[in-house]
Image: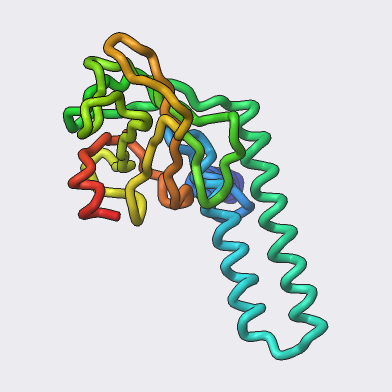
Amino acid sequence: MKNLLKKIGLAIIGLSVIILLDNCGSGGGGTSTNEYLGKLPGIAKKYTEKIDKKKKELKECTDMGKAFKLDEEVKSLGDEANKIIEEHLANNPLNALPFEQKTDYPFTINEVSVNTKYNSSISRLQLITKVKIDQDIKNEYGGFERTIFAYVTAVDKEGNFLTKKPGVFSSGFKKQEFKKGMDVALEGTIDDVKNLGKFDKFVFISREEYDKLK
């Protein structure tokens, strides 16, 4: 009886370790999950680590044949990673992501989502934000501004920056007059997807703060 209980205890401990490893995104190829971005940061982190390891091997390799093979493996891993991310976002759309507008723009930000118009990758997340124009936006010459921008950081629950530099949103460069009451979509990106595992929200900042951080 004592041996049986011991075996059951060991089995429970083993199962707990497996679950823990899986949740942490290590061991057995498990992928960690973020409350808002799902498995996206975990997938990016896992593949980035694999690719970086292969690149290091390639850099140190002195055998031409092996170097060619390693180079092909790097490209293959990159293609595989981007395909997985594309499929993941198609099956798990990331809409209405949490954000805070910390600065005064001549428009109000209403929504931030992953932009499915363009393919995100293990290094770059494509985003789109919907804004409402609060006032006619004029340029320094008195005419209507043709392009508007917004600047964003990604932070964790403690407000720590998660990426090396902020992201930039733009209305594009087509001719358009921004008048009060208009609904406009701004497109942008943010890098370092692998570092977004503790993502809590996007924070929109001023151009001045952006210039200090970029």
Location of the C terminus by quadrant is bottom left
From this view, report whether residue 162 is shown above or below residue 144: below
On screen, 4 above or below 73? above
Residue 90 in the image: above or below residue 58: above
Residue beneath the point at 45% across and 29% down: 128
Look at the picture and state if 95 lies above or below 20.
above
Measured as percent of width and height from the top left, residue 137 is found at: 25, 23
Identify which residue, 62 or 108, lies in the foreground: 108
Evaluate whether residue 43 shows in this view: yes
User: 74 or 108: nearer the eye?
Assistant: 108
Badge count: 0
Identify the coloring.
rainbow
Query: From this viewpoint, which residue is outermost toward the top?
Result: 181
Q: Is 38 left, or right, of 96 in this rendering?
A: right
**Residue positioned 53% across, 39% down in the render:** 39
Give percent across and percent down for residue 64. Answer: 78, 86
Q: Position of residue 41 (x, y in %)?
A: 49, 45
In percent of the image, x 29 and y 17: which residue is there?
Answer: 133
On screen, residue 144 versus residue 130, left or right, reads left
Q: Position of residue 175 (x, y in %)?
A: 45, 26
**Residue 77's quadrant in the figure?**
bottom right
Please report the residue visible at 65 percent of the width from the left and 37 percent of the height from the top: 86
Nearer the observer, 165 or 133? 133
Q: Quadrant of residue 188?
A: top left
Q: Is residue 206 left or right of residue 16?
A: left
Residue that extends furthest to the right in the rendered view of this protein:
65
Whether residue 2 is visible, yes or no, is no
Q: Quadrant of the N terminus?
A: top right
Q: Residue furthest bottom?
A: 62
